[in-house]
Amino acid sequence: MEKLIVTGGKPLKGTIRISGAKNSAVALIPTALMADSTVVLDNMPVLRDITTYKSILEDLGARVNFSEDQMVIDPSSLQSIEMIDDNVKQLRASYYLMGALLGKFGEAVIGLPGGCDFEPRPIDQHIKGFEALGAEVRNEHGSIHIKAKQLVGNKIYLDVVSHGATINIMLAAARAKGTTIIENAAKEPEIIDVATLLNAMGAKIKGAGTGTIRIEGVEELKGCRHSIIPDRIQAGTYMIAAAATKGDVLVDNIIPKHMEALTAKLEEMGVEIHELDEGIRVIGKPSYNSIDVKALVYPGFATDLQSPMTTLLTQANGVSVLTDYVFNSRFKHIPELIRMGAKIKLEDRSAVIEQSDLQSAKVKATDLRAGASLVIAGLTVKTGRTEITGVEYIDRGYDNLVDNLKQLGADVWRES
Ligand code: EPU
């Protein structure tokens, strides 16, 4: 079993360059399968979820070359076979194969997705969208069977603003006959990234990034080259780590506009922020104000930064309240932070966080962002050695974490 060992107490200092966005990449890879020729994806992050997706693509018959930060996908010999193996079950974003294969072949059989199971994560809105486009959907023995003679555009109102359902419906609708309108669509930058790739492949999508997306179906999608947007959640994690360790870090190669909700909250706490064209410099201060944070759908404060932010708020004077309105119970990091001395109470979907002196301890990452919150906690601890197990979760979303943190002056290493 691998562990991360952190001996904290050192302010992070220096520059960190952010890679491509995981949550874009895991949608863009299945999108590329819908082309009839080669798609080149640049700025691809090197992560466990990406290598898992590469294996899934190869099982489907695609030819994939992944080197450095570029993935070349040739889907010309792709087949719509049943995808129910462990790789599919391990990966939450395997659900995008439903929309991609349904759009391309009119059918798909996909094992129910796994991934970070911090709470039950339904896919009813994805299915509602496929059915509205004319597909029959059955859940049999843990797999979703989807089939349509002809996908036909429709007006689809999402009952909950869902990032995944918006993308999945957009994928299937790109090849439907006629026009699809998604109302109450999610607005995340990753959704715009998928629409940009689809449009470069020949799709006709307007309104991505707003609450109404209009998709005119097309008969073919061709190969192209696309560069993945920077990872705003990785960027936010390093910004929070810089503030928590009272450091001075330039988080580079990002789109500062994507970080606005976090930047506003850090400034409210008293963190010094300098926004540049493609970077944000975060300068920590000796003490911080307590604040309230509400995790909401984009452009609100990202739920994925809720757990790292919990750790930072243990360093603020007084009492802070952090409420997650996206996921009801994404709080598995809290018992582990309490093990490290954090004074946190859970009240319904809110964490009430008091200023705390964190201590080193042996803790366990139970999902990706919970893992990030524990790493930041370890960096903040003044003495002793924090041991974090569950490293496989952290590897799903943070590439080169250990090297990046070392480059910023942290004492972090892996042990088996
Ligand atoms: N929901 C439903 N029905 C659905 C779909 C969603 O009720 O059919 C609910 C969910 O239970 C949740 C809310 O809607 O309460 C939002 O879920 P959403 O569908 O937006 O989440 P997702 O698409 O499954 C993606 C990211 C998550 C990120 C969320 C919210 C990927 C692969 N995952 O998940 O990222 O937290 O959007 O922004 O893109 C992570 O990176 O650590 C991560 C979990």
Image (cartoon, rainbow, N blue to C red):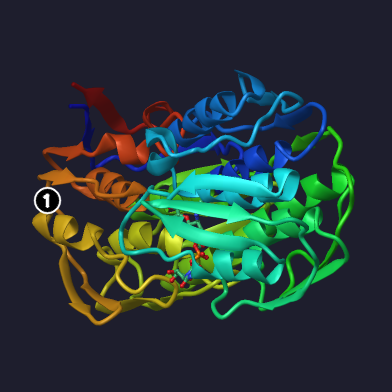
Q: Quadrant of residue 157?
A: bottom right
Q: Which is nearer the eye, 148 or 339? A: 148
Query: With respect to residue 203, does 287 lie above or below?
Result: below
In this rendering, would 277 be left or right of 314? right
Read off the residue under disc 1.
Answer: 359
Residue 72: x and y in percent read: 71, 23
Residue 348: x and y in percent read: 25, 82
Q: Element at badge 1?
A: loop
In this rendering, would 6 be left or right of 241? left
Query: With respect to residue 152, does 283 lie above or below?
Result: above
Quadrant occupied by the N terminus: top left
Residue 374: x and y in percent read: 26, 49
Q: Which is nearer the eye, 131 or 169? A: 131
Q: Is residue 236 visible?
A: no
Q: Is mark 1 within 8 Å of ligand 1?
A: no
Q: Quadrant of residue 338?
A: bottom left
What's the residue type where badge 1 is placed? Gln
Q: Is residue 130 visible?
A: yes
Q: Residue at x 76, y 25 (%)?
A: 76
In this rendering, would 122 be left or right of 76? left
Q: Which is nearer the eye, 357 or 222? A: 222
Q: Residue at x 36, y 51 (%)?
A: 141
Residue 302: x and y in percent read: 49, 65
Within 10 angstroms of label 1, few (less than 14), some, or many (20 or more) residues? Answer: many
Q: Which is nearer the eye, 403 or 24? A: 24
Quadrant occupied by the C terminus: top left
Q: Residue at x 44, y 29 (%)?
A: 400
**Which residue, as the protein is rendered here, is positioned at the far front?**
149
Query: With respect to residue 55, does 94 lie above or below?
Result: below
